[in-house]
Amino acid sequence: MTNLLDIQNISYSINSEKILRNVSLKIQSNMMYQFIGGNGAGKTTLLKIILEIMPPSKGRIFKLQSFSKKYIGHKIPLKNYLTLDENLKIYLNNFSETKLIDTLKKLNLYDKRDTKFSSLSYGQQRKAALIPIFVETHAMFLLDEPFSGLDNAHIEIIKKEMISLVGDGKTVIFTSHIPAELECETLRL
């Protein structure tokens, strides 16, 4: 395992409301981390601080080496007016077409490629948003509420892929309101 990030005493406040208080954590390769907490606990905020989208109010994050990362938020970034296939051509980077076809079949989306995104169910849209974890190559995946809107069978498929990523030496950080039954480091916020 390689140290990727050293998070030291991160705090974040909006006006006078403290969202995060003195969070410290070392992020390593070949590991999975779960940030767990209720609504407004700071899970997404901590992901955004790690991604350098927003600065902490206090504390520091030391990036110990350079690495590629992919963030998949809880808001689906795909366009309703495009088909699933058109969206994926824009959304995905550096992927194998064979792997994509296998993933679409695994997620029961293969026959939906020519369907307008707006015509897909929320669960189908959510699965489409998670396709990068199956087909793209990054050292770190940051997933905000990845199981939201999925049925149990597809939650298990996503969990297996997350475990596979860690087995391949990748780092997975995900948020959840409830504990996931996965072997991972858990940070309660």
Image: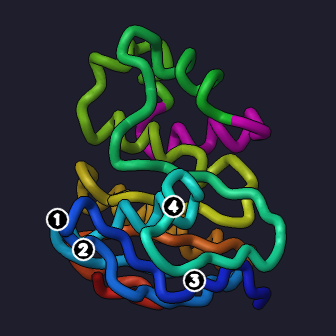
Earlier-in-chain disc, 1 versus 3: 3
**Mark 1 and mark 3: Cα distance apart in space:** 22 Å
- Residue 67, position as x, y percentages in the image: 79, 64
Q: Amino acid at mark 1?
A: Asn
Residue position for label 2 = 18
Neighbor class of circle 1 (other Cα within 10 Å; few <14, some 14-19, many 20+) is: few
Q: Nearer the viewer, residue 140 or 107?
A: 140
**Mark 3 and mark 2: Cα distance apart in space:** 18 Å
Tell me the mark number nearer the camera, choosing from 1 and 3. 3
Q: Amino acid at mark 2?
A: Lys
Secondary element under disc 3, as helix, strand or loop, is strand
Give the quadrant of residue 21: bottom left
**Residue 108 covered by magenta stretch:** yes
**Mark 4 and mark 2: Cα distance apart in space:** 14 Å
Tell me the mark number nearer the camera, choosing from 4 and 1. 4
Residue position for label 4 = 55
- Residue 139, position as x, y percentages in the image: 73, 65
Residue position for label 3 = 7
Tell me the mark number nearer the camera, choosing from 1 and 2. 2
Q: Are marks 1 and 3 in contact (CB under 8 Å)?
A: no
Give the quadrant of residue 154: bottom left
Earlier-in-chain disc, 3 versus 2: 3
Q: Amino acid at mark 4?
A: Pro
**Which stretch is magenta?**
93-109
Q: Amino acid at mark 3?
A: Ile
Secondary element under disc 4, as helix, strand or loop, is loop
Please give the name of the residue rendered at 56% of the width and 75% of the height, measured from the top-left corner: 163
Earlier-in-chain disc, 4 versus 1: 1
Residue position for label 1 = 39
